[in-house]
Each structure stands twice: as structure tokens, then as C-alpha cells.
């Protein structure tokens, strides 16, 4: 698993898709957070109180979920996002760019 993660990290540092995503999302996230604390959690069960976050991101994750999980994830995002907050979502533009979601699940 460690080798796979290292290989993935290497690809994400060099390939146009990932560098472009960081170039696009980075300034949006910086503007929305302005030095505030960041957190990471399971998207279908986020362990934070309602209306906690000014910014929520879901980058290349929603399309890998079942319909029920996607609905739960969006409900959780809605619940924890402050009114007037920012949501940044990135999904594959074409099905072929999604990869094989079944290899991500056990």
C-alpha cells in the first residue's frame, strides 16, 4: 500500500490534471479560508456540528460513491456548511476519467 501511495503522489505532482486542479482550487480555498483551521473526515459521516465550516471541498470523491452514499455525503456537506459558505466540488468530466471505482472498495 505504501508503494501505491508513493506512486500516486508522484503522479499527482507531475500530471497536468493534478497541477491544473491545484492551480484552480488552491486560490479558491485560500480565499475562502484565509488561514483558518482545516479538517478531514469521512464524507458520509462527518463528525462536526452543523454549520461549522465556511468551506467544504469534495475533490474527485462523489463519483466513486453509490447513489445512497452520494445522497448521504451531500446531506452531510449541507449540514456542516455555514449559511453562505463555499462548496468546491470536482468530478470527472467524462466517465472514462473516473477510473475503476471498484478497485477502491473492499
Image: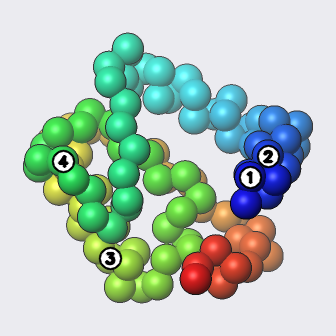
Element class at badge 4: loop
Taking the image as shown, residue 58 lies to the left or right of residue 3, namely left
Q: Residue at x 74, y 52 (%)?
A: 2
Q: Residue furthest front?
A: 2
Q: Is residue 106 left or right of residue 93?
A: left
Q: Is residue 12 visible in this depiction of the protein?
A: no
Confirm whether residue 54 shows in the render: yes
Instruction: Identify the residue at image location x=38%, y=25%.
Output: 32
Q: CA distance from mark 1 to mark 3?
A: 31 Å
Badge 2: residue crowd in 10 Å (few <14, some 14–19, many ≥20): few
**Along the viewing direction, whichever of 84 and 16 lies nearer the viewer:** 16
Give the answer, above or below, for where 97 lies relative to 13.
Answer: below
The residue under label 4 is: 48
Residue 11 x/y as whole percent: 85, 46
Camera-side mark, 1 or 3:
1
Q: According to the image, label 2 marks what residue?
A: 6
First in residue order: circle 1 vs circle 3: 1
Residue, disc 1: 2
Image color mode = rainbow
Are the residues tagged 1 and 2 within 8 Å (C-beta)?
yes
Quarter where residue 96 is shown: bottom right
Tag 1 secondary structure: helix
Q: Is residue 14 left or right of residue 54?
A: right
72 above or below 54? Answer: below
Q: From the image, state whether disc 4 or disc 3 is nearer to you.
A: 4
Q: Which mark is residue 71?
A: 3
Q: Position of residue 92 (x, y in %)?
A: 67, 64
Q: Is residue 41 shown left or right of residue 63? A: left
Q: Quadrant of the C terminus?
A: bottom right
Amino acid at each position: 500500500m505504501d508503494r501505491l501511495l508513493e506512486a500516486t503522489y508522484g503522479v499527482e505532482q507531475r500530471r497536468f490534471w493534478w497541477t491544473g486542479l491545484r492551480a484552480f482550487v488552491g486560490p479558491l480555498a485560500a480565499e475562502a479560508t484565509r488561514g483558518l483551521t482545516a479538517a478531514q473526515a469521512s464524507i458520509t459521516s462527518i463528525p462536526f456540528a452543523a454549520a461549522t465550516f465556511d468551506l467544504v471541498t469534495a475533490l474527485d470523491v462523489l463519483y466513486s460513491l453509490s447513489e445512497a452514499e452520494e445522497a448521504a455525503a451531500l446531506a452531510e456537506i449541507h449540514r456542516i456548511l455555514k449559511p453562505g459558505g463555499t462548496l468546491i466540488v470536482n468530478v470527472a468530466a467524462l466517465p472514462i476519467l473516473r477510473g475503476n471505482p471498484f478497485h477502491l472498495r473492499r
